[in-house]
Image (tube, grey):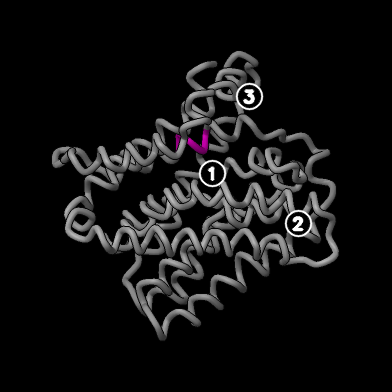
Amino acid sequence: MRVNSFINKYFGVILLCSAVAGLFFRFETIDSSVVIIISLATVIFSSFFRINLSSELYKSDWKTIFIFYGIRFLLFPVLVYFLALPMSNFYAIGFFLLLMLPSAVSSPAFSAMYEGDISLALKVLLFTSFASILLIPLLSSLILTKSVAIDTRYMFLILIYTIVVPFLAHIPFRRSKTITNFFVSNNALVTALGLMTIFVFSTSKNREIILNNPGKVMIYAAIAFVFFALAYFIGYFAIPGLGKLKRIALSVCSGANNIGMGVTLTMLFFPGETNVFFIIAQLSWIFVLIPMRYFYRII
């Protein structure tokens, strides 16, 4: 469809315009948190239709996945948090949360784009998504509650609502080829609409912080860009000895994480400035894909 092709081509511009649009709207009579949770759940619901759930998909690569998850999603977030904490409590929390987020629903598509192992990317996507339901609240309660008050039980429920419920809800609809083809064909449109809604409402809620600190916003963008680039490199070099296709898949799953989930969680559980950092990080998340394309070609 032309609409989906247009969205894929100008995805970054669309999200940027959504963030800017949020500065001009106020939603005082609408519960922004409910709207954002439903929007994220809808995006994830639609994306599950693109995943092949056949048993053949899950018969290999598990040793690689467990090692990768332990290094990238457990060891590294904790290490970075304690390294950054003496310099900045704000960035220590932000970096920890960014590193804990599961791989993005678009990571298998990006892996295919860069000629990586699509099967491995799919497995990492599913494993990190469901593991995050337990580990993000658990590690947050063990580490972050010393720096900021977090209702980790409610956070756990939010992750259930946005990951498990959409997964279970989409299963009966997979029996219909018409519905499946609709969501597969229009995933770009559904994803764009969901993320646009998240951006508009998140930005609107924090418009004063953004408008009063334009210089800080630029600093956030630059820091997030460097952060995501390093995350891609870490994923590529995390496990020595793997072939290039698998390294590309792990790199993409490391750098292209579910930043939309991060925007949602920081809006619900963290101070407004942390949410602003994640909103800006979403834009950097998109633009860092450009240099990575050339990195995979030359390495």
Mark number for residue 299?
A: 2
Give amino acid for label 3: Arg
How many angstroms separate mark 3 from mark 2 (CA)? 39 Å
Residue that badge 3 annotates: 174
* Front in this rendered view, residue 2 or 126: 2
**Mark sitting earlier along the chain (2/1):** 1
State yes or no: discs 2 and 1 in contact (Cβ < 8 Å).
Answer: no
- x and y, in percent, of residue 143 in the image: 46, 76
Residue 135 lies in the magenta stretch: no
How many angstroms separate mark 3 from mark 1 (CA)? 16 Å
* Front in this rendered view, residue 135 or 229: 229
How many angstroms separate mark 2 from mark 1 (CA)? 38 Å
* Front in this rendered view, residue 81 or 155: 81
Pointer 1 local density, CA inside 10 Å: few below 14, some 14–19, many at least 20: some
Residue that badge 1 annotates: 164
- x and y, in percent, of residue 205 in the image: 22, 49
Region rendered in magenta? 41-45
